[in-house]
Image: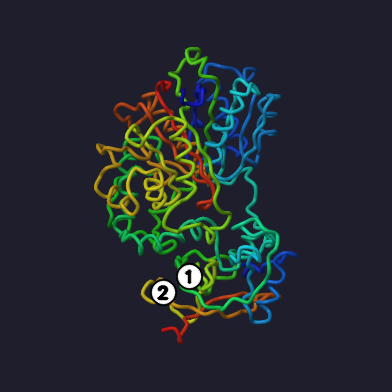
Amino acid sequence: MPGKAVPVPTPETQPYWDGCAAGELRIQRCVDCGEPYFYPRPICPSCGSGSVEWFTASGRATLYSYVINHRPAGGFEAEAPYAIAVVQLAEGPRMMSSIRDVPATPEALVLDMPLRVAFEQRGDVWLPVFTPDQEAQ
Amino acid sequence: MSGTGVIIAGAAETDEIGRLPNTSTLGLHLEAARNAVADAGLTMRDIDGIATVSAPGPVQVAHALGIYPDWVDGTGIGGTSFLLHVRHAAAAIRAGYAKTILITHGESGRSRVGAPPYRMDLSSPTGQFEVPYGTLGPTTTFTIPLLRYMKDHGLTHEQLAYVAVAQRQWAAKNPRAMFRDVITVDDVLSSRLVAYPFHLLECCLVTDGGGALVVTSADRAADFPKPPVHVLGTGEASETPMISQMVDFTESRMFRQAGRKAFAEAGITTADVNHLMIYDAFAHVPIYGLEALGFVGKGEAGAFIADGNTEPGGALPLNTNGGGLSYTHTGMYGMFAIQEGVRQVRGEAAAQVDNPDISVILGNGGMFSAAGVLVLGRSPRP
């Protein structure tokens, strides 16, 4: 069985992965219109500006939606069934992630529950995942 | 004048659909092409335009058929591509770039004979930002928006299951459908979980098969053996390469956008529609489609289907071949949705509806990634 997929950064996404390795969720925002966005890219999707900057997001998020997957991808066999989630960052953008420290059940995974980012090593990169935010609850 | 000025003059599927381990993906394209050209009463020498997806792509398909076309379209954005091919063909015919365009689909989706291997580029945005979280194809991604919709709109598990129940009633009338035994909500909810909240019977089939179309000018409507199917309106849109970046998980922006274009071009409203096909890779897609096209209000589609409106005898016959859930789903199902719309408008469907004046086809590509809409009619609109 192949191991879990390891993302391959590109020049445009390298600062994101560098941030993860440093324990920070770094995303981008537009200098001209101020809109934060994800996934990393050099043009603002809100106004088309090429003047964009990186910043460190708060790491706070809520659970927007998910599935509990019973047919595991390569490397995930031991974890199935496992949740594949989309979280909404406090800054607004959404991203796919995994939810840790919560059973993969509909009862435990409650939409809109507060979450906080954590980082897991995967090959030579660190991957952002989310855990319940105890302080917010 | 409304409408596109073109007709579908020929339409056919492969002789068989389902499990076809002795035919390659290319072979399925060629068989479907031959059947559709014959259905139009034409020969390959009459074809001067070609459209299909890769692989094998339009160059391969044209060459294998002995066609050296003046117009080539390789638009490949998933299962709705063939709806876009019809739209692009209409534009090409109006512009004079081609006169008689062949659109083909073939896919050894189940047997994987002569089919390209699945490969994910881990440096693409999807490869970097989704695949590492354990996604594995459509069951793990196309499905993700639904829990948000269920929470915001109160859709129940039983209502979702009923989408499969309603479509199986149509499939039971269709000898070519893969699954024909009538099922209940309990059957659906007791089938195994694939990706909660989706059970096996809420996911499409995986099959082998193909289909093809011949599109030409409406000026030639009287020249063919079968009744002409007028392409009254067309729409297309794209939204997102990644499910996590869908604009709003409770509605499909691209379905609405493509639908508005198609309905405006045809000069129709939802009240004019007698027959509807909505690409159903999973049971929630018809729910999103009914709402995006404006047949019901937001949050109302689950109850609309559960109340019997889309099943045999209902006011709005939907997915009358049985759909991707019960008829067939090779991977790029859109061609089969068009084929059923053509059959209904011609009056030759297995489960024929009454007064099939206008049929609307809504196609999906990828995971809510791209959309196409066709409005087909028995007559040109005034």
Nearer to the camera, B281 or A117? A117
Question: Helix, strand or loop at disc 2?
Answer: loop
Q: Amino acid at mark 2?
A: Leu
Q: Residue furthest right?
A: A11
User: Which quadrant would the C terminus of chain B be assigned to in this image?
Assistant: top left
- In the rendered image, residue B334, in percent from the top left (x then y), is placed at 50, 40
Q: Dot 1 falls on which chain? A: A
Residue B304, above or below B351 = below
The numbered disc on residue B86 is none
Nearer to the camera, A16 or B302? A16
Residue lying at 34% horizontally and 32% vertically, measured from the top left: B272
Q: Are marks 2 and 1 in contact (CB under 8 Å)?
A: yes
Q: Quadrant of residue B212?
A: top right
Q: Dot 2 falls on which chain? A: A
Residue lying at 55% horizontally and 70% vertically, measured from the top left: A76
Q: Amino acid at mark 1?
A: Ala
Residue B372, above or below B356 = below
Give the residue number, with chain letter if any, for mark 1: A83
Give the residue number, with chain letter if any, for mark 2: A109
